[in-house]
Image: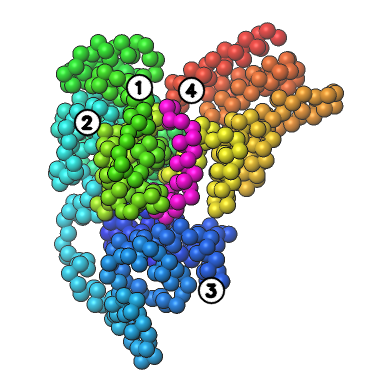
Amino acid sequence: MEKIYDSQESSVNISDTAIYGSLEKEKVVSLYKLHGSVTYPVGSRMSFTETELTDLFIRDNKLFETVSFKLSTAPTIFWGTKLSDNNIMQIICNSEAYAKSSMQRWLVVYPDEKNKEFIEDYIDLGFNIIEADTKELINYLGEQSFARVDEGDKNIYKEYRDKFPTSFICNELKKSGVKRPVVDFFAGAEPIISDIVSNNVSRTSYYTVLLGTILKGNITLITGIPGCGKSTLLMQLAFSKELSGRKFWFNNIIEQEAVKLVNLVRDDENVTVFIDNLYNNVDALKVLRKNENIKLVLAERALNYEYVKRFLNISSDRIVDISELNKNDVQVICKSMNRSSSDAFDLMASNENISLLEIVFYTATSTQIQERIKSYVRDLKEYKDNSLKIDLLELFVLVNYTSYCGIPCSMDMMYFYFSDCIESYKDILYALKKMNRIIVESTDYDSIGKNQDYKEMRSKLFAEKSFNVLEASVIAKVMNKFLDKVGIHIIYRYDIFKRRAYDADLTKKAFCLEDGIEFYEKILKNNKSPYIRHQYALFLQRKKEYDLAWSQIDQAYTESKKKIFSIANTHAIIMFERNIISEASDQRELDMLKKTIEKSFLTLEFCITQDVRVNYHILTYARNAIRYYEKYDWDNYAEQYVESALKQLDILLNSEEYIFHGTLRELKNLQKKLVMIKKSM
């Protein structure tokens, strides 16, 4: 099926729901592979026999529920399948949504005398009958008004707009989308096109810096702390008149779209592609980087730089960190809001790492974001309405969870999640109306179609700060229920969601030890990825269960064939932690302990020489060298580790590589401690 859409002439892309989940996007068709696929990794299950198909429905019933549900929402042609097949009958007969659906359904029956006896049975099941062979049906459909017609002499820029209607920057795009008061932006909402083209959002001094950087090279990265204005600046640059040529702007772009874009602009020598949330779009980046005609302007938070840099091959002069606040910029922004800048300066003085978003929000509302969220959560707990069928706090945490994972929450996802307590979508919409101050319509125009609503927290920073004030029991309830009721094929951009959905940073707060183990074991029944075991091990390590953590990380390390450096790093950390706290009963046991600890340092040394994320590994190495010295004092091993750590730090700190200022500060502090240790000997 993928080969049909691979054609350069196709303006439509195909999206495998096992990879991307539900991607309802213009020019994208979702593909559900019920029986598995030869395109999946070796070892993935495929089902053919009657027994296998029956087992498949039991094993992966959420997939069948999803397909039944999606079929109930649109007219359907059953083509090239037997209704006697178990999986088809399960979809038709076992779905309440499909049974109640009034959508028309057609069944293609091959024109043969022996098939006529079944036609009445099919009609009784509610099918319209099409008697045709494949060629006849394709020819018939090709003659209809909705079929694509080749236009002999195409306008190249019209083709850009037709194939990327929500990403190609032109007058039509500037006029499209929601128009809203700019005060919504100042109150913490993500920027949208109307904010940018209205010119009501002031440009900071970084705008000029970035203009100069973009004009001097083929790739530019905007980075910084959460809430510092990366997305706003990226959009201002994308929609600016100062940068000429053809421009495309994406919040999300999948690999297949990147391939189509490269082919589309192959002969155009003045194309700039702006991509926000680079961490979520590295597969597309790998494709776009191969075309030297395309200039790239990218945005990603500094915390994720260590991950994305291996795909960039970028020098530090091509990176602009916009974390540091300029007082003149703050003054200009406050003036555009008709507010005094004195409150903003007071907030900056009392908070070292305050973001621009937090300052703007405080100036607009006289409240800090976290305090506003606390107040909001209290209101949700106390709110009473007999017409509500959904717990508002649970809905809040659900949307907060998906936003934290980098995706909006679709109505389909909410429908599946709340399926046991609602009668229809109206019950969800009624609840959402009570929460429109903080749960908003997604602004992700380049990725989301118009088939349903998509909801998200007012901003990504709101989502992250909310988890600091929510009770662990509510988070745990939502994460467990989501895992049980929402299948991967209905999750919007599942490929993005899964990167943070089972993150140990989240599960440590949500679960006690026993509940966390149960949560991860439940995931591992269907997803035995080493990445899941990695997060499982980190969760156990943070609960100080080092033996259990070691069991999981050692298995992940083995399954990944020692080639995933983040897993190798955690393997070294847990090996070190597990042994540094042990006490030896005699010299022989002490020697064995030190030998085992040495293996953890050797693993880190390997990572440092092989992985581009050097900072990550050197930090761990230096921390562990200090801890080894504090435990065992100065010996041959300590001397070796301290010398090696100092050498690595010296090379890194004297390199021209970009290092996030928070990481840089810690690296320098570690260097000072190690120098003091060495001098004291």
Q: Which residue is mark 3?
A: 50
Q: Which residue is mark 1?
A: 371
Place residue 552 in its image quadrant: top right
* Viewer-nearest residue: 190 or 287: 190
Q: Amino acid at mark 1?
A: Glu
| Residue drawn at 56 percent across, 71 percent down | 51
What SS does tag 2 mark?
helix
Q: Amino acid at mark 2?
A: Asp
- Earlier residue among tags 1 and 2: 2
Q: Position of residue 222 (x, y in %)?
A: 34, 30
| Residue 663, label in figure | 4
* Viewer-nearest residue: 133 or 274: 133
Pointers 4 and 2 in contact (CB under 8 A)? no
Whether 489 is among the magenta residues is yes
- Earlier residue among tags 1 and 3: 3
Pair 1/2: label in front:
1
| Residue 184, label in figure | 2
171 over 369 or under it: above or below:
below
**Left or right of residue 526: residue 205:** left
Q: Position of residue 591 (x, y in %)?
A: 81, 26
Q: What range of the chain is rendered magenta?
A: 467-495
Q: Answer few, some or many: residues within 10 Å of disc 2's Cα (few below 14, many 20 plus, some between 14 and 19).
A: some
Question: What's the distance in space between the residues labelled 4 and 3, CA to CA?
Answer: 57 Å
Whether 537 is among the magenta residues is no
Q: Amino acid at mark 3?
A: Glu
**Left or right of residue 497: residue 564:** right
